Amino acid sequence: MKQVVQNYKSGELAVLDVPVPGCKPGGVLVRSSYSLISTGTELMKVSEAGMSMVGKARSRPDQVAKVMQSVATNGVPATYRKVMGKLDSYTPLGYSLCGVVEQVGAGIDDVAVGDVVACAGNEHALHAELNWVPKNLYARVPEGLDPRHAAFGTVGSIALQGVRRGEPHLGDVALVIGLGLIGQLVVQLLTASGVRVVGVDPDPARCGLAERLGAAACGDPASAAVEAAVAGLTDGHGVDQVYLAAGGDSNQPVELAARLCRDRGRVVDIGKCRLDLPWNAYYEKELDVRFSRSYGPGRYDPEYELQGRDYPIGYVRWTERRNLACFLDLVARGRVDVAPLVSHVADFDDAVATYQRLKDGDLKAVAVLFRYPAPSGAAVAAEVPSVAVPTVRVQPGPPRPATAPVRIAFVGAGTYATSMLLPHLAGRDGVDLSTVVTTTALSAANARRKFGFAEATTDLDAVLGDSAVDAVFVVTRHSSHAELTRRALLAGKAVFVEKPLALTEEELAGVLAAVEESGNDRIQVGFNRRFAPLLREARGRFGVRTGPASVRYLVNAGRLDHGSWYLRGDTEGSRFAGEGGHFIDTVSWLLGADPVSVYATAPSGTEDLQVVLRYPDGSTATVSYVTSGPASLPKETLDLVADGKALRLDDFVRASVYTRRRWVSSRLPKARDKGQQAELAAFVKAVRTGGPMPVPLESLAATTAATLAVRASLAEGAPVTLARAR
């Protein structure tokens, strides 16, 4: 089998062929599926190995003390041989993984061959294809939990034990210093416990990530914003606990802890940072300084870890193993979300290069996973990740008489509906605004008064059962789009649904199943940019394309306000899942085809995305979706190059086409027209006449599937094929 090792003397990293460990009694042999690189602990070890002997000594004064003791006891020559022998040996890396039980040792009756388990320990959960793991260092993975996420079990247990040492209570306010991997998990665990959290880290991206994962506020340690946030949340008393999850030689974390902690508060050291406690500051507040020892009680106890002797639960409630199982349960139930922490998934064979990229800073990451190959004979070839693009076959319904007005009902009357859709429909010839449906009576009444709806109600069933209603607009939060669309289609209504159509493959399949069941294919998704007059004119000026194209689409999405429902990724999907379809649809319309594969990558600690789309004719498009750009940068810029020609769109304000002669749009519009008015006109016409819908259903399904494939590609770290279902 293969295993990642390092020579601490030379710093060499290697993937070696080593013997398969035996399956001893009291444990199980586990074949690794995914193992996690600790970008803190492991990189520190890798960096130390590359130092000179003097540098190694300075970084590990504890080991130098042992060497000096050995010199006093055994003499210089014997000590030198002992130290050099130990340094000039391969040592393992890794301590957190998820895998499948391949063999069960004597005395084990809680798991069986084929069970999925999470494993812990820097001697037993190594970056290796196979590991022998003793009973108290593994836990069964809850059904349905992604193995990638279960691989976080050990670091999650470290964070969980640190939180337990802080003894937080509902309503407490805590400060987390250091927002690396452990710090991000501590933030989520505290938030799940009803604690308001302020985070501290010099990296703005990590601060932004922590806020998205639940922190009330985050900032640079030198920023006055941190102290202001603490003062505001605690009425000036200071935080109840401080969790030190930082590393390095600076004494700033413990000094900041003393300054921002309340009288008789608790300071918990989880990471490995300098701890020169300012005596006066800690004494005057009588601060309680606590250490958190790794995964929990049982750590470093050979009888517990190697011999499987558990501690009675009545005396030790949370042991290493129980912490591990608890963290897995929290992730499985969605109380902790580790998916945003995964910056990169690398093949195990690329381990050395991955470590080098991390060390050199080329790969900036919060968490990196190794993906292991399937065992020999288990599969002929590696499975290519794919997302299905469902297809439907329906008979078009009878055309509606052109003389009748189109009676429209709106489900939802939020900001987008009232600012971007209803102003283009109110008072329009051939349109009758029949009913507005909202969950709160007042919002329905406001929309009725402002836009002239005949009725306002909170009863959706009554609207769907009203035979006089021709079309239903679904303009609600993302999580409800698919179900409301499905119900409206089954009720025989034409449907205009704002993006996204669906947040999962199952939701998309459900919508298309409703189309087949009802024979009703009258659906439009709010992909309005393809209707923008400026972009349409530019495409006409560009002319017919004969060869493959290269497209670059930069979307400067900007940051969301704290508390925005768009940030509720657990219920509303990721931000890109919500609006990414806009940009994929625009590119597909420009190229006249649907994508066949999607590859996505994300810079560490941000919501920025690079999405590469491949098309049947060899065309490629890159959608750069950034949330960290300055507000002064235009929101959308697009470039298409093909056949020696180029098209450029500057934020729907100006367009240019470069051929033998350059064309530039003649004047700046008074306002950006992103196509909503033209899209609504096309939809109303299709409903009124019974003609084809503005965008083919197959294209809507393909764009939705491509948007969903972005998440799958991020998880796999590989391109995802868009497979047309039959």
Image (spheres, grey):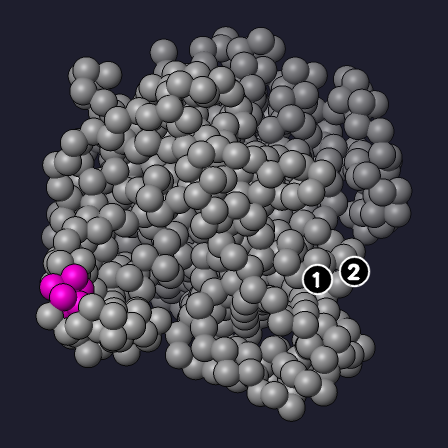
Tell me if residue 634 comes above or below residue 723 in the rendering: below
Label 2 SS:
loop
The one of 337 and 153 positioned closer to us in this rendering: 153
> Is 81 colored magenta in this rendering?
yes
Which x, y percent locates residue 275?
50, 78
Cβ–Cβ below 8 Å for labels 2 and 1? yes
Residue 127 falls left or right of residue 390:
left
Residue of label 2: 171
Which x, y percent locates residue 115?
43, 20
Residue at figure coordinates x 40%, y 48% from the top left: 342
Residue stretch in magenta: 78-83
The one of 298 and 388 positioned closer to us in this rendering: 298
Which x, y percent locates residue 91?
22, 51
Structural distance between the alpha carbons of marks 2 and 1: 7 Å
Residue 445 falls left or right of residue 103:
right
- Under mark 2, the amino acid is Gly
- Under mark 1, the amino acid is Arg
Instruction: Check the image and name the residue furthest to the front.
Output: 73
> Is 607 colored magenta in this rendering?
no
Residue at figure coordinates x 31%, y 64% from the top left: 44
Which mark is drawn over residue 196? 1
Label 1 SS:
strand
The local crowd at label 2, few if under 14, some if 14 to 19, many if 20 or more residues have their Cα within 10 Å, is: few
The answer, for residue 675, to whether it is visible in the render is no
- Check the picture and name the quadrant holding the N terminus: top left
